[in-house]
Image: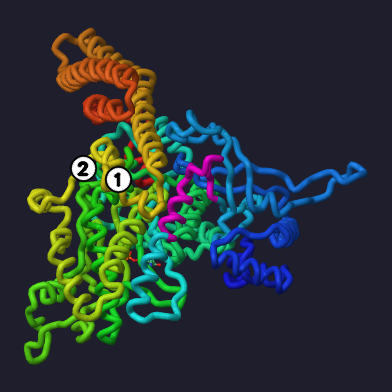
Amino acid sequence: MKLVSDYFGSMVFDDKVMKSMLSEEDYNTLKRTVKDGRSLNLSVANAVASAMKDWAISLGATHFTHWFQPMTGITAEKHDSFISPDKDGRAIMEFSGKELIKGETDASSFPSGGLRATFEARGYTAWDATSYAFIKDGVLCIPTAFCSYGGDALDQKTPLLRSMEAINRQALRILKLFGNEDVTSVKTTVGPEQEYFLVDKEIFKRRKDLVYTGRTLFGAEAPKGQELEGHYYGVIKPRVQAYMNDLNEELWKLGVFAKTEHNEAAPSQHELAPIFTTANIAADHNQLTMEIMQKVAKKHGLVCILHEKPFKGVSGSGKHNNWSISTNTGVNLLEPGDTPGENAQFLLFLCAVLKAVDEYQDLLRISVASAGNDHRLGATEAPPAVVSVFLGNELTEILESIEKDQPHHEAKEKELLRVGVHTLPKFPKDTTDRNRTSPFAFTGNKFEFRMLGASASVSGANTALNTAVADSLKQFADELEGVENFEAALHDLIKRVIAAHKRIIFNGNGYDDKWILEAEKRGLSHYRTTPDALPHFTDEKNVALFTAHKVYTEREMRSRLEIQLNNYCNLVNIEAKTMVDMAKKEILPAVSEYSQVLSNTILAKTAVCKTLDCTYETEILTDISALTASAYNMLKYLENSIQAAEKEKDAEKRSIAYKTNVLPAMTLLRKDVDALENLVSADYWPIPTYGDLLFEV
Ligand code: ADP
Ligand code: MG
């Protein structure tokens, strides 16, 4: 039997391999430069490249690629072989330090949101040496960041790394104030739980909507849905188990700590969660996980669907972003401590998060905005589009006692809770009645941001979160550095932060409509859809935040907004056109054919005997005819809406046109077609049904 410990990370050029293949001097230089975030000198880079090449070739690799995450949402790679001619024209395998550190790439085919127009088309990729190189399909992949020659970030990774740097800078200032002299770096950690659907490949292929858009644009609900709640944590079927085993093995080889797997709420829906790691590595691993999930599925005659809402009336798929901050000495800064000092530090970091989430609710909302996620947020399976924080009653009460200078009810002798002087009353860490409806929940020693859609990169959300928290920490450090009475100043600061930002705390049911009203009363922002949310990305306060912490330049922000708006429009446009195509070429012709069968039956029956009862045929035919006429009208209406939207030049206005005209037209057409599906004989219905899709695996 193969032992996992023998092959875990076998395809990764990790620390162990580096140590064994590099000279001690080169290894130490590499480690030091990576730690200090400086660039590698060429002689060490050459040594690393050569070792990497030998290692990769020994594992059957012939090519290498700079692996990066452009704004398309998926990863990109361009393969180059190691082959080069020697002086006799024979092939030798080469890979230089220069090729390792920096790659040139034509940036003009990747989304740049207008940056391309004014700047060079060329871009370059630069090695992110904190994320290990790995071998995938015989190709040595080198995780890189992708920028234009002018230095503008064109990818997801660059801003994420910059935001990690920002939070590192500010958190270190705070930690110094608490006397943590041994801490030299602070990193954010992320563990993303990934939801997905598995459907049979042959059935999938017969649905153009799934093939082109990843979601069903038509489909009447099956008689059985998820009402019996029989699937959540249910027994995993053999075919799915075989898939999961294979998937785990592939991920483990790549050094991804895939840890838990279980069935989710909807039929055919599952989840995979890894063990958390440093944010940029978690982002790389999550991209890799999504890619491998889809690849392994094909081998099993399945398709893995990562769309946020593939099926109407059935829970969609999200990605829970578990997030915390930890030091290089191994301390989780969101873990409540045992001593008054540790507790005070914990409370300050907690307050930094509260303040950040309250002040930048809009940015967090925007970071999860996509056409797909619009169908999920605020539906029955996901938090609403309003951001709030769940702390749990115990912790909330503690904050209240501090804010109001009241004794905490658990305190002995009615003692007032003084930050930095007293320890916190114990609160249960892992309450089983955990609130699962909150968009941003404290779960004992980390926060779980639950608004992300299943297909999204986690980079955007973590970039926003890291930067917003860095900003809170900066303000705290500015205020606390150099004060005479640290304890008093700290207590006072924490009190003020709680008072100013407690409106963001909500421990109740986030799915309740009453909460939305209450949230609006509290002045929390509520951007229902992507076109509502996105334009606020470049609001003055947000530009000020990102530029102050050097995470985005204003130009990069404007370009990103442009890209996001275009993505939204393009996605809805493809969906709308796919609907038109399916309705025109598959569904309405089939309905028409079936109508003919009914008419012929009526004619035949009446020919046999004038008084034969044709109620069934006549009534169904009447309903079908009326619905067909209506569907055809809606089809024309949809086509007109698409045309009108396409004409709109301004991206923001165009996105509004898709939202207010095209999407509602799609809903109307679907309504008629789904009603027709319920009337037409199964033999004549041209595409697989929800029953086929959801219950066949
Ligand atoms: P649940 O489904 O109850 O939310 P899971 O065990 O499925 O819990 O997922 C919890 C996730 O949180 C895992 O990916 C885990 O690695 C991650 N996690 C735990 N501690 C931290 C931390 N300090 N920072 C970031 N992620 C964490
Ligand atoms: Mg979770």
Q: Which residue is mark 2?
A: 527
Q: Is residue 146 magenta?
A: yes
User: On the rendered structure, is 573 left or right of 228?
Assistant: right
Label pair 2/1, CB-CB below 8 angstroms: yes
Label of residue 424 in the image:
none
- Secondary-structure class at tag 1: helix
Of callouts 2 and 1, the N-terminal one = 1
Mark 1: amino acid: Ile
User: In the picture provided, is 624 more to the left or to the right than 24?
Assistant: left
Pointer 1 local density, CA inside 10 Å: few below 14, some 14–19, many at least 20:
many
Quadrant where the N terminus lies? bottom right
Quarter residue 28 falls in: bottom right
Q: Position of residue 362 (x, y in %)?
A: 25, 48
Q: Position of residue 564 (x, y in %)?
A: 37, 37
Name the quadrant where ligand 1 sits: bottom left
Residue 93 at x, y percent in the picture? 79, 51
**Number of numbered discs:** 2
Find disc 1 in the rendering and name its residue: 366
Residue extending farthest to the right is 88
Magenta region includes residue 154: yes
Question: On the rendered structure, is 175 left or right of 76?
Answer: left
Evaluate whether residue 222 shows in this view: no
Residue 445 against residue 385 in the figure, above or below = below
Rendered residue at 64%/60% (across/down): 40
The alpha-carbon separation of the residues under discs 2 and 1 comes to 9 Å
The magenta span reads 145-165
The answer to whether residue 332 shows anywhere in this view is yes
Q: Which picture quadrant has residue 320?
A: bottom left
Other-residue count near label 2 (Cα within 10 Å), few / some / many at <14 / 14–19 / ≥20: some
Q: Nearer the viewer, residue 127 or 487?
A: 487
Quadrant of res 635:
top left
Q: Secondary structure at mark 2?
A: loop
